[in-house]
Amino acid sequence: MAKYARLRARVEAELPEVELVEPEPATDDLLALGHDPDYIARVVTGSLSPKEQRTIGFPWSEQMVARARRSVGATVAACRAALVEGVAVNLAGGTHHAMRDSGQGYCVFNDAAIATRWLQNERSGSRRKRVAIVDLDVHQGNGTASILANDDASFSFSIHCASNFPFRKEHSDLDIALSDGTGDAAYLEALDNGLAQLTARFAPDFIVYVAGADAHYGDRLGRLKLSTVGLTRRDERVFEFARELDVPVAVTMAGGYGHDIEQTVEVHLNTVRSARDHWSFCRRSAKEKHL
């Protein structure tokens, strides 16, 4: 948990051009875009069973509810900002294991799925916005895949470690499962192939990018072997992809459990740097178009 405060402090100190905004917590109505009202009520009132709390991974508290609400609110706020600025980042989020009626894997509410539904309600004329979720956390985004199943206006794409949690995978629109020990070159090749498949099958108006740090070689839970440089190249490819499609992108941080917490924070900070560089590029391009 300490990584979040450290990340925010480093963004504030090292990226002064990034505007830091405290998000509003998600309301019950917003949460209901992705979750059953009965599950929301059990979380909010502290009525989760001991088994449900163990599956989520931490005990119920009012602080847990407040954090879960604000994490979703931050991803929706990032989507709202990205519609104007081209890119925005939630310094937490990525709670992609939460199912419609349950939580798991440290995820209470599914921010990516809820944000996708929110974006779809922000229609492009008479048509719902088409949202692609590019999930590059080392664990499959099983909750996102489940909540958004059979939704023609969304496309869930996950690259993950085959042998890692969750051990019962869901079916994303596109899954690429990698072997333990996969390094930079093979990972980036898989990403390039996956993004090509995405564009061949789906035309997004918006990208939600789940940018986990847990594919790093120093991660306790990751099992893949990406370097810090490899993860930065991963980020750059996603932002280049957004530029090619000329669509906004909202980023969430997702997992990161390094033996050295500073390595995890550095990976997340590099993602924010790449988002800042993407924003700067988009601003220059917009200026040039008006000259």
Image (spheres, rainbow, N blue to C red):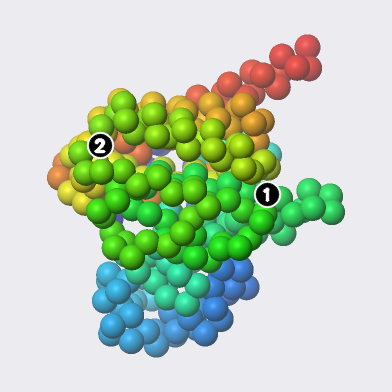
Q: Residue at x 30, y 48 (%)?
A: 161
Q: Are marks 1 and 2 in contact (CB under 8 Å)?
A: no
* Kind of residue at badge 1: Arg
* Kind of residue at badge 2: Thr
Q: Residues within 10 Å of mark 1 (few under 14, many from 20)?
A: many
The numbered mark at residue 130 is 1
Quarter of the image for the C terminus: give it: top right
Classify residue 113 by image quadrant: bottom right
- Which percent across, then down, holds residue 128? 74, 54
Q: How many marks?
A: 2
Q: Is residue 143 above or below residue 181?
A: below
Instruction: Spot the residue most to the top.
Output: 291
**In this figure, which residue is indicated by the disc labeled 2?**
182
- Which percent across, then down, holds residue 162? 29, 51
Tell me: 202 left or right of 91: right
Q: CA distance from mark 1 to mark 2?
A: 31 Å
Please tell me whether mark 1 sits on a helix, a strand or a loop: loop
Q: Is residue 107 above or below residue 132?
A: below
Q: Residue at x 67, y 19 (%)?
A: 285
Classify residue 15 by image quadrant: top left
Q: Is residue 22 above or below residue 238?
A: below
